[in-house]
Image (spheres, rainbow, N blue to C red):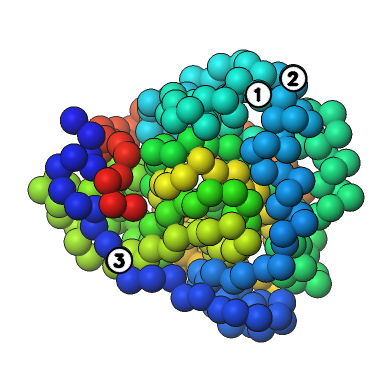
Amino acid sequence: MKASAIAPRRRYPLVERREGIDRESLERDYLARNRPVIVSVVDVASRTHWDLATLRATYGDCAIDAEETEQVYVGQRARRRLPLSALIDGVLAGDVALRCKGLELLSTIDGMKAQLAASPPPSDRLLPTTTASTRRALWVAPKGTMSSFHHDGNSDNYNWQIEGEKLFVLARPDRFDELYAHGSAESPINPFHPDLGRFPRFASAAPLEATLRPGEVLLVPKYWWHCVYTAQPSVNLNTWFSFRGEISPWRALAGAPLLHRSCAALAAEMKRRELFRLASATRRLWYAAYERLADHPRPEPRGELLDP
């Protein structure tokens, strides 16, 4: 049975919205304090380059690796290769079996990276002037799909909504224990329909929620847990970034278990020193230890929400 058929979804206090905020204020009041916020951007022309119709017309013949949505945990999801046009047709038809998680899409599809360089996302105007590196992902998802409850590690994240709507539930980095974390970065909980009988500590997690609409940017600060529900056929673009003077992992994870906090800070320091191979090897060992030693809680079911 779909979770949405059981009861109305749980609702939470709203993430703050700011109109007309400049990048200096955003850095001072939110990035430096590791707080989420939604801001509006002027981007009508930019969005027309990336909406579903344009993507299909321009890149529809290109093959992509779509992600099957049945499994909750990222490492358990299979991938399927098909033309982008077939995925978009399925998205528009309401097929919830696949979505595009385009971490490599911008680099592998001819012309897409050049288009992004020619027409940068409006969220780039909000990046700190000392931004040192960025990484992007393009997402194409059908209505009714939902991510795991997870965090993205040591990167701040500007999530620019291009088409459709997405609903986010966010929880602070120090809520590791209340989220019954699986591994270092995923939770079995469906925060829209949490089973407090199985996960009673979640009642103290104090999440926030945010509905992201076209032309809006959500700052998901580093290590903030988030679960994302696609309320309408959707396209959005993530920009993960780091910058000089950003909050440290040790400070951001204050209150998290000491082992998790220490390992996260160590991994971030290796990346800062450009020891990428060592950081990757350390991460593989970290996950292998979790797979062997830690509990593997069965994730709560996902399903279409009747009242998003």
Say whether disc 2 or disc 1 marks the residue closer to the N-terminus: 2
Q: Is residue 190 left or right of residue 156?
A: left
Q: Position of residue 20 (x, y in %)?
A: 65, 81
- Cβ–Cβ below 8 Å for labels 2 and 1? yes
Q: Residue furthest left?
A: 197
Task: Identify the residue at horizontal 42%, vertical 47% (top origin).
Answer: 231
The amino acid pointed to by label 2 is Asp
Query: How would you rate the neighbour count of disc 1 (Cα within 10 Å): few for under 14, some for 14-19, many for 20 or more?
Result: many
Q: What residue does disc 3 label?
A: 12
Q: CA distance from mark 1 to mark 3?
A: 36 Å
Q: How many marks?
A: 3
User: From what the image shows, is residue 209 above or below residue 273?
Assistant: below
Residue 35 in view (yes/no): yes
User: From what the image shows, is residue 127 above or below residue 303?
Assistant: below
Q: Position of residue 144 (x, y in %)?
A: 39, 38
Say whether disc 1 or disc 3 marks the residue closer to the N-terminus: 3
Q: CA distance from mark 2 to mark 1?
A: 6 Å
Q: Is residue 6 left or right of residue 187?
A: left
Mark nearer the viewer, 3 or 2: 2
The amino acid pointed to by label 3 is Tyr
Residue 157 in view (yes/no): no
- For residue 234, which numbered disc appears in the image? none
Q: Position of residue 179 (x, y in %)?
A: 30, 53
Q: What residue does disc 2 label?
A: 61
Task: Identify the residue at horizontal 52%, vertical 31% (top origin).
Answer: 91
Query: How would you rate the neighbour count of disc 2 (Cα within 10 Å): few for under 14, some for 14-19, many for 20 or more?
Result: some
Element type at mark 2: loop
Q: Residue furthest top?
A: 81
Question: For residue 32, which quarter of the picture?
Answer: bottom right
Question: For residue 56, which quarter of the picture?
Answer: top right
